[in-house]
Image (tube, coloured by chain):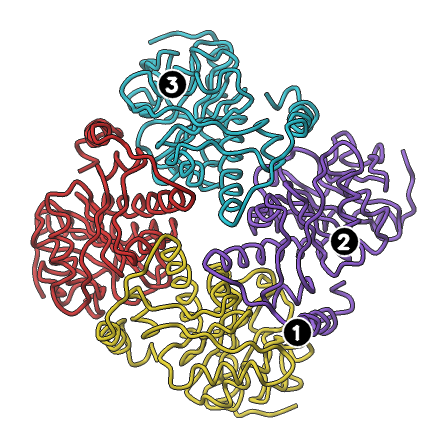
Chain colours: A yellow, B red, C cyan, D purple
Amino acid sequence: MTAFSPEIEVAIARTRDEVAALHAELTRYELVVWTGGNVSGRVPGAELFVIKPSGVLYDDLSPENQILCDLDGNVIPSTPGSDRSPSSDTAAHAYVYRNMPHVGGVVHTHSTYATAWAARGESIPCVITAMADEFGGDIPIGPFAIIGDESIGAGIVQTLSGHRSRAVLMQNHGVFTIGKNARDAVKAAVMTEDVARTVHIARQLGELLPIPQESIDSLYNRYQNVYGQNPAGELK
Amino acid sequence: MTAFSPEIEVAIARTRDEVAALHAELTRYELVVWTGGNVSGRVPGAELFVIKPSGVLYDDLSPENQILCDLDGNVIPSTPGSDRSPSSDTAAHAYVYRNMPHVGGVVHTHSTYATAWAARGESIPCVITAMADEFGGDIPIGPFAIIGDESIGAGIVQTLSGHRSRAVLMQNHGVFTIGKNARDAVKAAVMTEDVARTVHIARQLGELLPIPQESIDSLYNRYQNVYGQNPAGELK
Amino acid sequence: MTAFSPEIEVAIARTRDEVAALHAELTRYELVVWTGGNVSGRVPGAELFVIKPSGVLYDDLSPENQILCDLDGNVIPSTPGSDRSPSSDTAAHAYVYRNMPHVGGVVHTHSTYATAWAARGESIPCVITAMADEFGGDIPIGPFAIIGDESIGAGIVQTLSGHRSRAVLMQNHGVFTIGKNARDAVKAAVMTEDVARTVHIARQLGELLPIPQESIDSLYNRYQNVYGQNPAGELK
Amino acid sequence: MTAFSPEIEVAIARTRDEVAALHAELTRYELVVWTGGNVSGRVPGAELFVIKPSGVLYDDLSPENQILCDLDGNVIPSTPGSDRSPSSDTAAHAYVYRNMPHVGGVVHTHSTYATAWAARGESIPCVITAMADEFGGDIPIGPFAIIGDESIGAGIVQTLSGHRSRAVLMQNHGVFTIGKNARDAVKAAVMTEDVARTVHIARQLGELLPIPQESIDSLYNRYQNVYGQNPAGELK
């Protein structure tokens, strides 16, 4: 069994609590069905992350059955949950953590409207101010990639590096979001589906009005810096 | 610390209770996600209003963390909740209270279907009788305006002054509603999304049948005067 | 105060219980918002019916605040709830009970998809077998009529008399359903929205396949006679 | 009364528990309204299956009122629930169990989006990876058939025999799914509606991007063999 320092053990325990609890937001906002979707969170101060087990129902998730992995996606043996398989998307999460050091949380869903944009290979245009606030512009489309190698992780990192958006629509697949921590990534997943739905519905009946780029910039900068009770701590 | 008379303290406490509780209607009817949206209520008999704190989850709202402001949108110091920031839309609410003395409540949402109309810059045509009852005609579109000055508040007031509708769709943004009190404004927000959705769906498959203006007038006048248990007290 | 026989008092009490409880099905299936919509039930063995009060929230409904009316829609004085106004649609319900003696329940909603068909003045074509089972064919459109005289009630009775359907879409307005009792009318309201939604969505992407008339007839006859535990007692 | 061995009695009891409980998934995912839809499960080791009673509300289902049938769909007399009629779709379930020995569960729904595809007589194209995982390709359309003879059961078996999909869209009717057990069939019903909705919404706004056949094959093979905690036991 791997021994961690007491500080790291506390950080692992807190990350387990946070990741397990945040999965309830995916069902609350109907972003997932059955056992689909997953949340992970980096353990602060360690080369580790915590992720959902594979194929377990949301009602059965607990801090103890979340799975602790290293940044190559290997399960840390003899830790709680280590007798189970981690999410089948673990390799993609691990790739993101290895290559984006500022990322503290990753979320994956097949939420309906966002996945519909992905099935057409279209990015979501930034035509509502909430989208400018949260994503600073369009939500981009990522490449088609399937499980089995590093191509999903690489597609996420390639698309989001240097992009304001914390969400990517992987073509024909679904959504991956990143955040400074797991909660921030969950928020991005919730907002992605919300704007995917609103912009879809808007476009059903006619032309969308663009928002001027300078207004998008202004909204994004304000929201990232002054919104909420503790902007510097809360948002990316 | 500002001292208020006992009567005003009671009025503030009641407004805190009402505003905190009414936020649950926004989640019940799925008009908001995460920390989005807000309700405020004018304190009867005072130059004050109570509004939701910024960036706080709906589950965590209570009478004590609502924020008391003056009609310029300044937080009243040393009152419950005053250590937090008020909603980032506080300036818009304050502008409405200053300029529309008959308004006792304001609500803001990004509810899906209404915001979709706003993203096309289209008002919602009055083609169902419930809309004639509640809004007396079309729900109008307001100007594009972003946070940072008085332009949102001015856009709301300019659009709704002299208009039967208690709701405005701010272009590329979302919904603001007004009411004689906070509950009335929440009802308007609920009904706005309901009619935005119904009329959107109706128009997806063909031409809408107009309602004759004299029928709209008749329905509006009846509903404002005779509906409910106590029309004069309950509705605008 | 009007005196009723003990048998009628029991029948009134049971009808109050049933009508109050059935309103929860309207919110469960999201057929109504705020205080909209209403259920009524005829009191077996009497020239009376029980209906929802006007403008009262669904959470606040109880057997005691349902309102007892005669078949002209007049509130029976000095009975529980009689200090309140009955639903503003009471005249329409009363008209149906007076003119359709086999009807024991009436429901009114503005449910979204059904009202969308009504805003275009289109009946819903019978293209799914569940609709053949339940309605025996198309759900018809009724005339445009507004509150203030007998025109809504007359439009319902005129449209549904001799028709298999227990539901009518009143143009630009919403749904009225009838049933052998209040529960049966509520079921019809639930099924109306369900098929209105399914057929709407089907038609969004192409041509609908018709069901042969002889199959519609066969399905309708079977369902009305052999479905459920006690067909003769349960269904019309 | 038919006497079963103690082992079979235990298997029947477990199947009753499982089938009764699984119906809650149909309402949780809003695949059914009122008394529509049904789940059945084969009793392991016996020529028997357990199915929902006809016309009973979901809130009132329990292990004791599920109905035990032989593989011709006859109710086993003098067993719990045998005083009631089984689901009106019992003959179709029985036909599947008789003709597909590897099937341990069958589910029927009229879920909205799937039934919409069925009303146009269109199969659902495999354009999202979750659909490749779960169904290995398109979800096929089955023939038009109505209750009264073996035509529904025969249509299901004919369409699904030799097909990767565990779901069939019966034309103008709804969904039937099969699985290695009742839970697996319920999962297929949940996933069918999820992909029916996503692909519908995707196609509303433009052309769908196909997934290469070799990727579909790869995803299907992986998911059937390595996903979840116990793939060989959990999935077909």
Q: Nearer the viewer, residue A125 or B168?
A: A125
Q: Is residue D228 visible?
A: no
Q: Quadrant of residue C210?
A: top right
Residue behind mark 3: C153
Q: Is residue A131 left or right of residue C223?
A: left
Give the CA separation, mark 1 to mark 3. 60 Å
Residues at discs 2 and 3 both on one chain: no
Q: Is residue A15 above or below residue B97?
A: below
How packed mark 3 is, by other alpha carbons closer than 10 Å (few <14, some 14-19, many 20 or more), is: many
Residue located 27% across and 75% down the image: A220
Which tag is nearer the camera, tag 2 or tag 3? 2
Q: Nearer the viewer, residue A114 or A50?
A: A114
Residues at discs 2 and 1 both on one chain: yes
Q: Is residue B20 left or right of residue C94?
A: left
Residue A184 in the image: x percent, y percent? 40, 74
Amino acid type, label 2 = Leu
Residue C126 in the image: x percent, y percent? 56, 33
Residue located 49% across and 79% down the image: A41
How packed mark 1 is, by other alpha carbons closer than 10 Å (few <14, some 14-19, many 20 or more), is: some
Residue behind mark 1: D215
Q: Nearer the viewer, residue B137 or A64?
A: B137
Residue behind mark 2: D160
